[in-house]
Amino acid sequence: MHRRHDLDTLRIAAFALLILYHAAMAYVAGWDFHLKSTYTAEWLQWPMIAMNRWRMPLLFTISGIALGLSLPEHGRWRHTLRRCWRLQLPLLFGIVAVVSLQAYYEALDKGDVAPGLARFLWRYWQFRPWPGAHFSGAAYGFTWNHLWYLAYLLPYTVLAVVLASLLRPLRGALPRWQISDRVLGGLLLVLPVAWLAWALLVLMPHWPPTHALLDDVYVHAESLPLFLGGFMAARWQRGWELLMRGRRLTLALAVLGLCLELGIRALARLPHVGDVDAWVLALPWGQTERIGRALYTWCMLLALFGWARVLLSRPWPGQGYCREAVFSWYILHQTLLIALLYALRPLQLGPWLEPALLVAGTISGCLLIHELLIRRVRWLRPLFGLRNDASSLPVARVAPV
């Protein structure tokens, strides 16, 4: 029995990058966000694309692994109900008390409402549609904005446990094929890339991401297999050994996929691209770009897990504190960010000082609210995903396979 410090560190780093990513969303030109700065830059699209392709897939995969490591042999449904409650309570509280503030500032920015937070919240908490309004969730009467991840984890968790329970009696009856590491590694590389490429080429054009749960076909096609794959592979020791041995190859393939996607995007922006021969334009550039994206997404995930297993398998000072704080920071950060941006924008501080203050203020606000309020008030802790007893954090179990 031991903690998977590599997974803890990856999870903490992924949520830390989420703060920077959402801050940059206010400054990247050509991309929609709840609130935009007047200082936008087109060059930010490139690093944002590079981060976007694996940040949420990483979190869904880690969540699946965490469920697979923590699921007991007996009392599975009691464990699942507790886990779902720890997701649902922060989601409901976040919609009512945290994300509602984001909706207010976005509605102010778009001219949907007059200033007056109390009046807005009184109307918002009726959860009725806002005819003619343009802020996120107006058509439904509420929004979960960045908390959509929690809403998706709820059905994914139940589905994973149901499948595990149904397949449990078959474990001993299934045939055991002897597959070499080379063949197994090749299958683990090719098949997921093929699935992700198919989802990008076939599903995404018809069902672009909505983060509305019920009609989000492409996001489910990407995220659910990653969650279930992490759940099934959590205790698969041979798989983790393959990841460690193949970490250099997967990193090289990830770089290749990224260069392929960004290179084609850059070529498409050249001023005289329309003047080239017709046969060149007829080549499947769009499909190749999507395949490069799928290759980058999957191989980057494999590389991150492989390198983390090698380099990050030891605890570091402050890891326990960060592991506990990451959930409340996740819930708080975007609301603080949008409120700060709304306050900073009229000051016209410039394209460097404003984002620096925005990031510093968001981090400081998360730290102060978590440290001075959330973790010290017993009834607030579960509302932000924390256990009532800070000393009762579970120990992840890794069983050899």
Image (cartoon, helix red, strand yellow):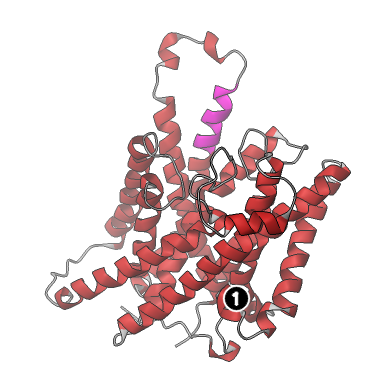
- Give above or below for 111 relative to 150: above
Judged from the image, the secondary structure of the residue bearing numbered disc 1 is helix
- Give above or below for 28 relative to 321: above
Q: At 70% from the left edge and 52% from the top edge, which residue is drawn? A: 338
- Give above or below for 116 relative to 109: below
Q: Position of residue 228 (x, y in %)?
A: 34, 63
Q: Which residues are magenta?
A: 259-269
Q: At 55% from the left edge and 76% from the top edge, which residue is drawn? A: 5
Q: Is residue 13 visible?
A: no
Name the side, left or right, on which 192 lies relative to 304: left
Task: Work out which quarter of the rendered image holds the C terminus and state it.
Answer: bottom left
Which image quadrant for residue 165? bottom left
Which image quadrant for residue 50? top right
Q: At 64% from the left edge and 77% from the top edge, which residue is drawn? A: 319
Q: Main secondary structure of the magenta part?
A: helix
Q: At 54% from the left edge and 58% from the top edge, which residue is drawn? A: 126
Name the side, left or right, on which 198 lies relative to 313: left
- Give above or below for 190 relative to 97: above
Q: Which residue is mark 1?
A: 323
Q: Position of residue 137 (x, y in %)?
A: 53, 48
Q: Position of residue 326 (x, y in %)?
A: 61, 70
Which image quadrant for residue 85? bottom left
Q: Position of residue 24 (x, y in %)?
A: 68, 47
**Observer-nearest residue: 181 or 38?**
38
Task: Work out which quarter of the rendered image holds the N terminus and state it.
Answer: bottom left
Q: Is residue 98 visible?
A: yes
Name the side, left or right, on which 104 lies relative to 167: right
**Observer-nearest residue: 372 or 55?**
372
